[in-house]
Image: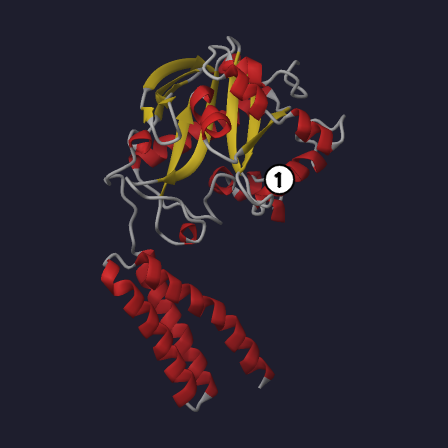
Amino acid sequence: MLGFLILGIVLLLPTLWAAAALYFDVRVAGLRPPLAVAYVAALLTVWMRVKRRWLKLGLTACGFAFVLGWWLTLQPSNERNWRPDLALLPYADINSNQVTIHNIRNCDYRTETDYDVRHYDRTFQLDQLRTVDLYMVYWGSPLIAHTMMSFGFEAGEHVCFSIETRNEQGEGYSALKGLFRQFELTLVIADERDVVRLRTNYRQGEEVYLFRLPASAERRRQLFLDYLNRANRLRQGPEWYNAVTDNCTTGIRAQRAATDRAPWDWRMLINGHGDQLLYERGLIATNLPLAELKERGHINARARAADKAEDFSRQIRQGVPGTDL
């Protein structure tokens, strides 16, 4: 009896997930609520009418397996009515020490939703890659942050990478929908005056923190190429975004070989505490208390003052620990 109850509780979560998958991911909108309700009703009938315990569990597991099998057949697409700032995919030509990045985004914003979409191409020399910086963006709960990586070159240029959902026209983000196959994934490659300034100067309630990562030249190069290779793969074939397994923080980690990944930590998922994890592992400056490090890395005020300045990237780094090295 105890084993039966435990298995029943274990199957409750997959059952709820399957009902939600039917509700969110069935492509015919009018069928979503009826199918989800019918699925739950059928399983309730099984549990009320079927007498044999193990048959109940078997039928419940089979129902979940059927929905999961259907769900895995859903395919992402690169052909949708995309939001203008996400319509053009970036990619890179990689030739030994030289890389040319195409479609670097540099939107000119008047408001968060009113902007002119602009892109440019730029060639970089890998042996001139000097810095790696991490942005952590909080928009509500301190438990969750959006992370972005920025790479700085000898001439003072910076290019920023942001793994995001690729939204269609009129489509907004939902963390709950992000657990299902609702959004394609995109890797935005952008000028900091776009992807950083959007969050500090135009979106309400977003707080942005900047941390310098003291990575070796080899590590900087490999991380930069990891992002570029991911961008090229997304251009060749679309992928689903997932709020747990393939998001702004777990996306790059997941593509690396298991033997080459940093040890797993719960703060990789509850990534609002990711700065604590980096601090404990010595991956950001540790000569200051973390609270002071974070306060000095809070860039909103400096970003608003810099606004459209050509040296925006230099101004927002003033006073950030480690960036004067």
For residue 249, side relative to residue 24 (left or right): right
The residue lying toward the viewer, choosing from 187 and 228, is: 187
**Image x and y of residue 74, in percent:** 29, 54
Residue 117: name its quadrant: top left
In the rendered structure, the answer to whether residue 227 lies left or right of residue 35 reads: right
In percent of width and height, residue 172 lies at 36, 44
Percent position of residue 269, x then y? 56, 47
Judged from the image, the secondary structure of the residue bearing numbered disc 1 is helix
Which amino acid type is marked by label 1?
Answer: Gly
Residue occupying image coordinates x 60% and y 83%: 2
Residue 252 percent across, percent down from the top left: 49, 37
* Quadrant into which the N terminus falls: bottom right
Residue extending farthest to the top is 155
Q: Which residue is drawn at 59% across and 42% down?
A: 272
**Few, some or many residues within 10 Å of mark 1 (<14, 14–19, 20+):** many
Q: Quadrant of the C terminus?
A: top right
Query: What residue is disc 1 on?
Result: 274
Of 139 and 244, nearer the camera is 139
